[in-house]
Amino acid sequence: MAEKKVEKKKESIEREYVIPLREKCRNVARYKKTPKAVKTVKEFLVRHMKIRDGDLNKIKIDTYLNEQLWIRGIKKSLYKVKVKAVKEGDIVRVYAMDLPERIKFKKLREEKGEIKAKADAEKQKSLMDKAKESIKGKKEDDEEPTKESTEEKTVEEKNEEKEKEETSKLAQEKIDKESAKKMKHTTKVETSKQVKNLAKTQNKTSRGH
């Protein structure tokens, strides 16, 4: 019997912490204070979010939280920071809770830019879809004519056939008239010639030739 594999659903865990940074950064050189603060945030979350192997790479710090930690430069780290940690599987994503006004303004501006970019992309997609539909409609009209167009074509064809028949009749009548005229002229000429020949023959007989 094949064993059925049971898939465990990844449950997301959300927690909020106020992480103290002063004690860990006190006995560190000035040019290492802010990097040490970033590391202490990761170590704190590894311990409290129960990451068994203790891998600091599984802690993903948000860009705005990183900017908040680096806002005072490399030599002056923050004393504490309030964060929100979201655990999904083995990865923990960390977000800042209380951002300074400067970073808040930057975040809002970037969010507006993203929303505008999405709206522009949707508009372009809709325009492209409309253009494709119009092209398809034109092709279908060319390939499959409607009943009205076929009826109009049949009526036009009938009218053309009638016109052709009438023109052919008129042409035939003209030809017949011309041939009749020619026959009349030829018969007249022949009769006049015959009369003259008869007159000559009579004259000769009377003279005794």
Image (cartoon, helix red, strand yellow):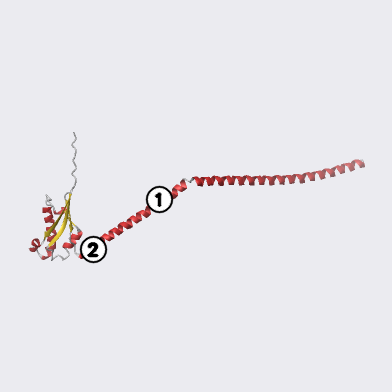
Kindly state the secondary structure of the residue where label 1 is placed: helix
Q: Position of residue 37 (x, y in %)?
A: 12, 61
- In the displayed structure, 167 sits above or below 42; it is above
**What is the residue that sits farthest to the right in this orientation?**
207
74 with respect to 201 (left or right): left
Mark number, residue 106:
2
Which image quarter: residue 117?
A: bottom left
Q: Name the residue under label 1.
A: 133
Q: In which quadrant will I find the C terminus?
A: top right
In percent of width and height, residue 139 lies at: 44, 48
Crowd rating for badge 2 (residues with CA inside 10 Å; few <14, some 14–19, many 20+)? few
The residues bearing labels 2 and 1 have C-alpha atoms spaced at a distance of: 41 Å
- The residue nearer to you, when weighing 194 against 115, is 115
Q: Is residue 209 visible?
A: no
Coordinates of residue 109 in the picture (x, y in percent)? 26, 62
Residue 169 position in % (x across, y down):
66, 45
- How packed mark 1 is, by other alpha carbons closer than 10 Å (few <14, some 14-19, many 20 or more), is few
Point 22% across, 63% down: residue = 104
Identified by mark 1, the residue type is: Glu
> Is residue 179 shown above or below 75?
above
Q: Which amino acid does label 2 sit on?
A: Lys
